[in-house]
């Protein structure tokens, strides 16, 4: 019986440690291709599953053994307080669901991710011996090797995986290239010290890692990463000199080499021409971020807006001067760095606890190294332990510095918490043993706590499973919609919404998908729209669109996208639904409350009035003039926020045209052209206005300008061909339509137009579908994936700051 119990205890202990080993191996390299966020969403799911498995096994071991070991130290207290602050900040968050779960907000900032990391910290710091920590570091070395070699191959354009998202040089298994560089820079000190102290195969692995990291850092070549590498290398050199009894001087050339290389790249910022150009990451400047933080703290100073909610802070508090920047319409879901993001989202308390978490492990780790250096040889820790602690301190110092200059990912946070836990396991002794006697209050309390953790843990696993299933179906919906399978897209997103009824994103997309299908159904039904069957389909899609948009708003009325979707649906129903104008205007008003400096919403309100004016009957001239004045007022307000807003000038031209003011129309069109000379779509829109006015010369000038920017722009070619036909330039018209046919060989309308032109007839003779007249453009919120994690956009090509100064 004793042997069976001992076997069970050993088995539970083995499962706990194996779950951690597996996490250390998989977290840096893990991703799955069937969700819209292939990296951090899947890493978070893996983290939660394995830490709960490890925790359940530890609890069972404790009950079988009848005792547990625990020592309370200051780092334990700091991590516990950080967790409590995050719990409070989540409860009072502007969007508690997103702050708890993460995706589609920032996964690494979520409470659930922090809970997983705290459990990991507990399992490692309380159960791992020095040997276990060393083995974990070896496993981490294997993972680092895979991360580095795959990242390097990706940057060079060697794509080993067949997935579309993996065909970009910016994709890697950590996150953005900045995240990859920070991770590898953090691993460099550990690889150096373990490479020095290890033997045979492990030495080969870690020295290979050092070489790979060197090449990866040169390829990524971000300034803050060189500063981080400088710090990590400097730390090894300092303690290498102080502990010359442990570190052989001849091996110090490795950290010295990286220190000198870091200084060189910091001072001269070279870009090696024959290497791939470093990738672009657009992010807020530190100063711009701090200004947003100050405004956010005025609204919620203690706990902030909630973990992962920086996107809401940015929208509400962005500076008007940002509209002068070419990237003015970008939304940032994270700040310039983890520390500055935390200041806005978790308030003063969260900021203080994060800084404390950064300082305490470094302080106590360095203190341990210094205090043990004066001990007699028989009392001093053995050299391998000191080397391991130094490598772990290197990880902590590099990631800590990175937190001040960059945002984190789930992988970097995982390595950071693992390093803290490993440090605690090495420098603190768990010498406090608590016995669970059958009749003691402690046993009753522990049993109650374990039971609660087990039940809540299983509950979270089931909820997370449902959430994961919903995300898989949402991804299928996106793929189906992009391939034109709109019915399948609607079915998939409905499954997603049924499995996760608390996420507004799915209902938002359901509204867009249903409305897109509604538009197709109306066109398809045509004259049969009043038939019972077609009418029923149209009414069903209309109801689905409105209901889904309203549900999304009910779930999260702080999300601007939800109000924009409702506004878009209502805007396109003007003339069909009586209160569509009021619905659209009020929805854009709500969006303006959440993002008061964005001129786009004012332009769309003006467009709403313009559409209303165009749908009035001819005998309502007085009402039309009043509505046109409202539209003009909105466009003028947009220009106050952004004086070079070409779209606003284009819309003012449409107002002037409707009012019969030719001078004002021409002036507005020239301003639109002046502020966006390289915008092919805008050139087309300007050309269409001249086309409708039958000013063929000016129209052709604009169509040709659009084609000079984008030579294969099909719409510009189409209208250029029609304009040539109106000008009597038959051969030029044929050339334009022939070019369209080359790209669209199955387009019957283009074939008919070419036949007409070659037979000497008008281009559109005999065609039922006439070319669409220029209409007021309304921008559809294109169904896409939610915002990516900071820096994970794989379309980046060179590093750049967006600053509101």
Image (spheres, helix red, strand yellow):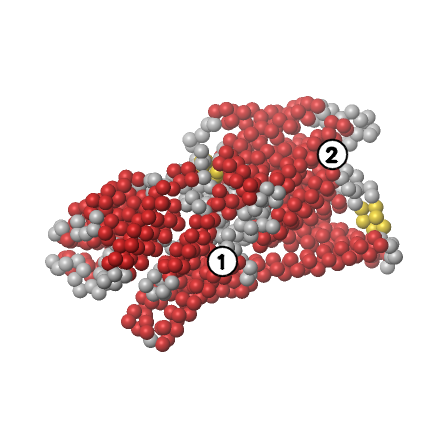
Q: Can see residue 324?
A: yes
Q: Which residue is rendered at x = 48% and y = 39% of the image?
A: 283
Q: CA distance from mark 2 to mark 1?
A: 55 Å
The disc at residue 528 is none
Q: Is residue 119 left or right of residue 513?
A: right
SS of the residue at dot 1? helix
Q: Helix, strand, or loop for circle 2?
A: helix
Q: Position of residue 547 (x, y in %)?
A: 46, 64
* Front residue of this view, candidates 397 and 548: 548
Residue 201 is drawn in which quadrant?
top right
Q: Residue furthest bottom?
A: 532
Q: Residue at x 25, y 63 (%)?
A: 617
Q: Position of residue 57 (x, y in %)?
A: 74, 54
Can residue 714 be spotted in the picture? Answer: no
Residue located beneath label 2 in the image? 385
Q: Quadrant of the N terminus?
A: bottom right
Q: Quadrant of the C terminus?
A: top left
Taking depth in this image into account, of 741 and 607 the one nearest to the observer is 607
- The residue tagged 1 is 553
Is 417 positioned to the left or the right of 570 in the image?
Answer: right
Location of residue 186 by image quarter: top right
* Nearer-N-terminus badge (2/1): 2
Q: Residue at x 85, y 54 (%)?
A: 441
């Amino acid at each position: 019986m004793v042997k069976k119990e001992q076997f069970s205890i050993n088995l539970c202990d083995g499962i706990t440690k194996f779950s951690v080993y597996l996490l250390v191996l998989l977290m840096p390299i893990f991703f799955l291709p069937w969700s819209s966020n292939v990296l951090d969403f899947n890493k978070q799911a893996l983290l939660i599953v394995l830490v709960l498995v490890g925790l359940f096994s530890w609890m069972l071991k404790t009950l079988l053994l009848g005792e547990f070991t625990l020592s309370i130290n200051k780092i334990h207290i700091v991590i516990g307080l950080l967790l409590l602050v995050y719990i409070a900040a989540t409860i009072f968050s502007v969007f508690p669901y997103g702050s708890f779960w993460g995706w589609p907000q920032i996964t690494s900032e979520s409470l659930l991710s922090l809970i997983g990391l705290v459990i990991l910290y507990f399992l490692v710091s309380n159960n791992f011996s020095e040997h276990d920590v060393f083995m974990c570091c070896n496993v981490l070395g294997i993972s680092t090797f895979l991360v580095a070699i795959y990242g390097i191959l990706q940057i060079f354009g060697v794509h080993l995986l067949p997935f579309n998202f993996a065909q970009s040089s910016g994709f890697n298994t950590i996150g953005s290239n900045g995240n990859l560089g920070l991770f590898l820079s953090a691993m460099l000190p550990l690889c150096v010290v373990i490479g020095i102290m290890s033997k045979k195969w492990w030495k080969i692995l870690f020295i290979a890692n050092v070489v790979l990291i060197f090449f990866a850092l040169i390829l990524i070549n971000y300034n803050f990463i060189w500063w981080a590498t400088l710090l990590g290398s400097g730390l090894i050199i300092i303690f290498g000199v102080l502990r010359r009894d442990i570190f052989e001087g001849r091996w110090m050339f490795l950290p010295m080499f990286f220190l000198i290389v870091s200084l060189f790249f910091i001072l001269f910022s070279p870009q090696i021409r024959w290497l791939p150009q470093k990738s672009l990451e657009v992010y807020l400047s530190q100063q711009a971020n701090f200004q947003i933080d100050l405004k956010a703290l005025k609204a919620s100073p203690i706990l902030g807006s909630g973990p992962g909610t920086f996107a809401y802070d940015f929208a509400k508090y962005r500076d008007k001067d940002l509209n002068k920047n070419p990237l003015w319409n970008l939304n940032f879901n994270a700040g310039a760095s983890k520390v500055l993001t935390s200041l806005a989202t978790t308030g003063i308390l969260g900021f203080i606890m994060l800084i404390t978490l950064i300082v305490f492990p470094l302080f106590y780790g360095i203190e341990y190294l210094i205090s043990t250096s004066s001990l007699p040889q028989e009392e001093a820790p053995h050299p391998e332990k000191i080397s391991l602690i130094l490598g772990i301190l290197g990880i902590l110092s590099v990631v800590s510095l990175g937190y001040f200059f960059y945002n984190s990912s789930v992988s970097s946070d995982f390595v950071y918490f693992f390093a803290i836990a490993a440090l605690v396991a090495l420098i603190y002794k768990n010498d406090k043993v608590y016995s669970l006697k059958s009749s003691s209050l402690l046993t009753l309390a522990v049993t109650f706590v374990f039971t609660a953790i087990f039940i809540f843990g299983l509950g979270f696993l089931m909820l997370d499973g449902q959430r994961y299933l919903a995300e898989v179906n949402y991804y299928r919906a996106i793929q189906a919609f992009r391939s034109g399978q709109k019915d399948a897209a609607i079915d998939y997103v409905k499954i997603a919404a049924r499995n996760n009824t608390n996420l507004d994103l799915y209902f938002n997309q359901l509204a867009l998908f249903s409305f897109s299908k509604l538009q197709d159904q109306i066109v398809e039904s045509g004259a049969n729209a009043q038939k019972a069957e077609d009418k029923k389909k149209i009414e069903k899609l209309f109801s689905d669109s409105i209901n889904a948009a309203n549900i999304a708003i009910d779930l999260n009325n702080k999300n601007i996208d939800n109000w924009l979707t409702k506004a878009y649906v209502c805007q396109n129903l003007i003339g069909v639904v009586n209160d569509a104008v009021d619905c659209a205007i009020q929805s854009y008003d709500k969006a303006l409350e959440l993002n008061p400096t964005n001129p786009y919403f004012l332009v769309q309100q003006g467009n709403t009035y313009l559409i209303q004016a165009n749908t009035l009957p001819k005998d309502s001239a007085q009402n039309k003039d009043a509505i046109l004045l409202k539209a003009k007022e909105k466009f003028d307000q947009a220009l106050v926020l952004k004086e070079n807003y070409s779209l606003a000038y284009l819309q003012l031209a449409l107002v002037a045209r409707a009012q019969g003011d030719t001078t004002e129309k021409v002036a507005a069109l020239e301003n639109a052209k002046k502020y966006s000379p390289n915008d092919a779509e805008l050139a087309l829109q300007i050309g269409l206005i001249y086309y409708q006015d039958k000013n063929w010369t000016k129209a052709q000038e604009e169509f040709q300008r659009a084609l000079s920017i984008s030579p294969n722009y099909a719409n510009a070619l189409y209208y250029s061909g029609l304009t040539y036909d109106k000008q009597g330039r038959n051969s030029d018209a044929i050339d334009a339509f022939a070019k369209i046919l080359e790209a669209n060989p199955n387009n019957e309308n283009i074939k008919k137009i070419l036949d007409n032109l070659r037979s000497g007839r008008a281009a559109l003779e005999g065609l039922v579908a006439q070319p669409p007249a220029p209409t007021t453009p309304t921008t559809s919120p294109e169904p896409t994936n939610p915002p990516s994690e900071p820096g994970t956009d794989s379309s980046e090509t060179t590093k750049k700051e967006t600053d509101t100064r």
